[in-house]
Image: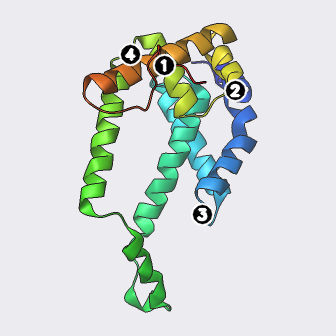
C-alpha cells in the first residue's frame, strides 16, 4: 500500500480516537506506568495488522489491541519478588475472589453468550458486537458500517431478541416478560 494512503488512513481512521483511547486506558488500567508507550505499541501493532489485511474496523481493532498490549504488560510484570511485598495485607484480596463454582458458572455463561452471538446473522452480529463489546454509539456504528441509525437500532433489537430466545431454548432465564403480559 502506498505510504500516502497509509498516512491518510492513519490520520482519518486512527488518530481521531487517540484521546478516547488514552481515557479508556487510564480508566481500565489505572496502574499503567506509561500510557504513551502503550499507545505507541498499539499503533505499531495496528499498522502491522493492517499490512496483512486483518483490520476491518480501525477503532475497534485499536482499542482491542491496546487492551491486549496492556494485558501483555501486566503478564510480563506478574513475577514479583517476595521482598517487594511491604504490606502483606494486600493479600486479603484473595478472600474476595470468587470460588471455583462461581468461576465455572461465569465461564459457562460466557460460552453460551458467545455461541448465541455466533448464531446471529452477520450484520446483526457486527452491530451487536460494536455496541456491547466496544461501546460504540448508534451513530458511530452507523458510520462504521455505513448503515442508517434506524437500521442499527433495528439490528440491535433483533440481536438482543434472538440472543434471549437462544438462552430460553437452552433453559437459561433472561427475565424477559412474555408479550401477552401487561403491567397495570
Residue 33 location in percent, x, y? Answer: 62, 67
Mark 3 lies on residue: 32
Foreground mark, 3 or 2, reads 3
- The residue nearer to you, when weighing 80 against 124, is 124
Label 4 to label 2, Cα distance in Å? 35 Å
Circle nearer the N terminus (2, 1) = 2
- The residue nearer to you, when weighing 139 against 50, is 139
Q: Would you say 26 lies left or right of 98 here?
A: right
Residue 93 disc label: none
Q: Residue at x 38, y 16 (%)?
A: 120
Q: Residue at x 51, y 39 (%)?
A: 64
Foreground mark, 2 or 1, reads 1
Q: Secondary structure at mark 4?
A: loop
Pick the quarter of the image with the N terminus.
Answer: top right
Residue 125 location in percent, x, y? Answer: 45, 19
Mark 1 lies on residue: 181
Q: Secondary structure at mark 3?
A: loop
Please, is residue 64 above or below residue 153 in the view?
Answer: below
Q: Residue furthest front?
A: 184
Label 4 to label 3, Cα distance in Å? 36 Å
Circle nearer the N terminus (4, 3) = 3
Q: Dot 3, crowdedness within 10 Å: few (<14), some or many (≥20)? A: some
Q: Would you say 96 lies left or right of 154 here?
A: left
Mark 2 lies on residue: 7
Foreground mark, 4 or 3, reads 4
Mark 4 lies on residue: 120
Q: Do the residues under discs 3 and 2 have CB atoms within 8 angstroms?
A: no
Foreground mark, 1 or 4, reads 1
Q: Dot 4, crowdedness within 10 Å: few (<14), some or many (≥20)? A: some
Label 1 to label 3, Cα distance in Å? 50 Å
Circle nearer the N terminus (4, 2) = 2
Residue 123 location in percent, x, y? Answer: 48, 11
Amino acid at each position: 500500500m502506498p505510504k500516502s494512503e497509509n498516512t491518510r488512513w492513519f490520520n482519518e481512521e486512527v488518530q481521531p480516537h487517540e484521546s478516547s483511547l488514552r481515557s479508556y486506558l487510564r480508566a481500565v488500567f489505572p496502574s499503567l506506568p506509561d500510557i504513551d508507550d502503550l499507545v505507541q505499541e498499539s499503533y505499531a501493532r495496528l499498522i502491522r495488522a493492517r499490512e496483512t489485511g486483518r483490520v476491518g474496523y480501525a477503532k475497534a481493532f485499536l482499542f482491542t489491541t491496546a487492551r491486549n498490549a496492556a494485558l501483555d504488560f501486566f503478564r510480563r510484570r506478574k513475577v514479583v519478588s517476595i521482598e517487594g511485598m511491604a504490606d502483606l495485607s494486600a493479600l486479603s484480596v484473595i478472600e474476595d475472589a470468587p470460588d471455583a463454582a462461581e468461576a465455572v458458572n461465569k465461564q459457562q455463561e460466557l460460552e453460551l453468550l458467545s455461541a448465541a452471538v455466533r448464531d446471529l446473522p452477520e450484520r446483526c452480529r457486527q452491530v451487536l458486537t460494536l455496541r456491547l463489546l466496544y461501546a460504540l454509539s448508534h451513530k458511530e456504528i452507523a458510520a462504521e458500517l455505513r448503515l442508517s441509525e434506524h437500521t442499527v437500532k433495528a439490528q440491535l433489537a433483533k440481536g438482543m431478541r434472538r440472543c434471549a430466545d437462544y438462552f430460553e431454548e437452552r433453559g437459561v432465564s433472561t427475565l424477559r416478560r412474555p408479550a401477552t403480559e401487561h403491567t397495570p
